[in-house]
Amino acid sequence: MPLTVVYDWNGTLLDDADAFTTSINTILTHFRRPEIDAETLREICEFPFSRLYEKLGLPAAAQDNDNELFFGSYQPLAATSGLRIGAERALEAFKESADVLILSNHIEHLIREHIALLGVESKIAHILAYASRESQYQGFTKGQMLQRYMREQDISPQHTVIVGDTPEEIRIAQSLGLTSVAMTGGMASESRLRNAGADHVVHDHDELLAVLTRENLL
């Protein structure tokens, strides 16, 4: 059975951590809160946004205005963001040896447009994400999306690796019996990723390939 590699999108494949931080600061400025630096944000960032906003001391109105405030800032910045260093090499390496999925809390058509713009759509077998901003975080979680897809496609957990930049992907791996590879440099600090119990912690996509090769997963 071939390996299945489940990639988070934001902060893992897409190099958008700076865009995300800038957009969170747009919201903080709007509600007259002090701005936050990337390292501090990595210590508290979690999803859905309501949890992060609560940690930032933002009022409930921040959640109500999330689409306008956050996406109004984030989308133009993210649209110019490229893949993280080594990501394209990793996707090319997986082309012959693994099926690559994207699992994301983001919006499917925006991801699809972006991977087409970056010229890597042929390297992605499937995208699991939300249909619209209105449906985002509603009804089912990333983990539930992946669990359903794996069941429908008869994908073996023993032959599945999930790669992400937050504890969320680690928890998904633990609940579904997958191998987790946490990648630093996204939206969670290295200490948080290690404390969450990742099977492996890497700093970039080249290191990811080395780990999978060493573990005889490729």
Image (cartoon, helix red, strand yellow):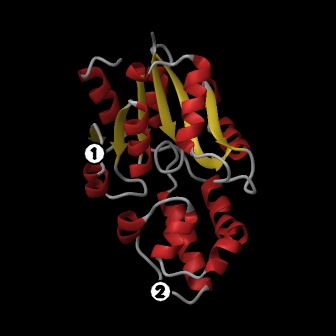
Mark 2–mark 1 Cα distance, whole angstroms, equals 32 Å
Residue drawn at (47%, 81%), measured in percent from left and top?
35
Residue 121 in the image, given as x and y percentages of width and height: 64, 30
Pointer 2 residue: 34
Pointer 1 residue: 197
SS assignment at label 1: loop
Residue 162 appears anywhere in the view: yes
Q: Residues within 10 Å of mark 1 (few under 14, many from 20)?
A: some
Residue drawn at (39%, 30%), measured in percent from left and top?
178
SS assignment at label 2: loop
Q: Is residue 87 left or right of residue 73?
A: left
- Rendered position, 34 above or below 67: below
Give the amino acid at mark 1.
Answer: Gly
Residue drawn at (45%, 14%), measured in percent from left and top?
97
Label at residue 173: none
Give the amino acid at mark 2.
Answer: Pro
Foreground pick, 155 / 113: 155
Q: Give the quarter of the figure containing the C terminus.
A: top left
Q: Give the quarter of the figure containing the N terminus.
A: top left
Which of the two discs, 2 and 1, labels the residue nearer the N terminus?
2
Residue 61 in the image, given as x and y percentages of width and height: 66, 80
Q: Is residue 104 left or right of residue 157?
A: right
Foreground pick, 39 / 128: 128
Residue 86 appears anywhere in the view: no
Residue 87 in the image, given as x and y percentages of width and height: 45, 36
- Rendered position, 139 above or below 153: below
